[in-house]
């Protein structure tokens, strides 16, 4: 994909995310895609990836993603890094913790490798500890 095509892809990806369209998001991935996620660990295949989105949207509703930057690398293969800040409301059970109704803000990055116009490998990086602090699971004190 060209740099412009990659940026359009990310725009569409974010729109699908904000509509909580797990099926549409899963279609962005190749059938054999692999995702590493702090929350869902290793995901192999489109079906597992779609389930992770379905589960995510049960836990965090009304998700919004603000894209801060998109870094595209077409020289080393089609890949990009998307830096983002997301917001959502904790509605469903997460690691045994029932929904708290708290809004959370998570900063992170998606590192994606493409084959054609589909993601084949993705690594999700985000501040998992900050999310747990915001949910009240972990207590932190400013130094």
Image (tube, grey):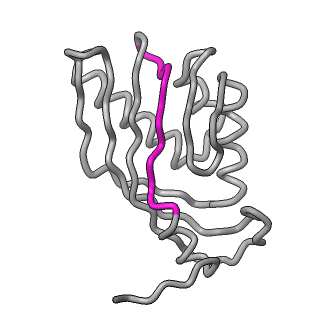
Of 43 and 27, nearer the camera is: 43
User: Which residue is at a point 69% across and 77% down the rendered structure image?
Assistant: 100
Q: Residue at x 30, y 14 (%)?
A: 77
Q: Quadrant of residue 136?
A: bottom right
Relative to 139, 119 lies left or right? left
Rendered image quadrant of residue 92:
bottom right
Q: Quadrant of the N terminus?
A: top left
In this rendering, position of residue 84 left or right of residue 94: left
**Magenta stretch, residue numbers:** 117-128
Quadrant placement of the C terminus: bottom left
Q: Is residue 21 magenta?
A: no
Q: Residue furthest top?
A: 116
- Residue 123: in magenta span: yes
In the rendered view, tell whether residue 64 sits above or below residue 6: below
Locate residue 27, reporting x and y percent: 58, 23
Vertical relation: 101 (above or below) 56: below
Specify whether 142 is left or right of 44: left
Question: Which SS type dominates the magenta stretch?
Answer: strand
The number of discs equals 0
Image x and y of residue 122, in percent: 48, 31
Q: Which residue is nearer to you in this view: 87 or 108?
A: 108
Name the residue located 29 percent from the left edge and 21 percent from the top edge.
5
Q: Residue at x 72, y 63 (%)?
A: 94
Q: Is residue 102 above or below residue 2?
A: below
Q: Residue furthest front?
A: 143
**x and y, in percent, of residue 80 in the image:** 31, 30
């Amino acid at each position: 994909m060209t740099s412009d095509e990659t940026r359009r892809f990310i725009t569409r990806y974010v729109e699908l995310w904000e509509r909580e369209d797990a099926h549409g998001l899963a279609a962005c991935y190749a059938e054999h895609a692999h995702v590493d996620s702090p929350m869902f660990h290793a995901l192999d295949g489109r079906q597992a990836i779609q389930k992770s989105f379905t589960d995510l949207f049960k836990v965090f509703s009304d998700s919004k993603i603000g894209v801060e930057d998109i870094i595209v690398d077409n020289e080393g293969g089609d890949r990009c890094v998307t830096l983002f800040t997301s917001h959502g409301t904790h509605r469903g059970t997460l690691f045994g913790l029932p929904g708290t109704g708290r809004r959370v803000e998570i900063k992170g990055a998606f590192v994606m490798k493409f084959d054609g116009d589909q993601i084949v490998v993705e690594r999700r990086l985000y501040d998992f500890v900050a999310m747990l602090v915001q949910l009240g699971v972990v207590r932190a004190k400013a130094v």
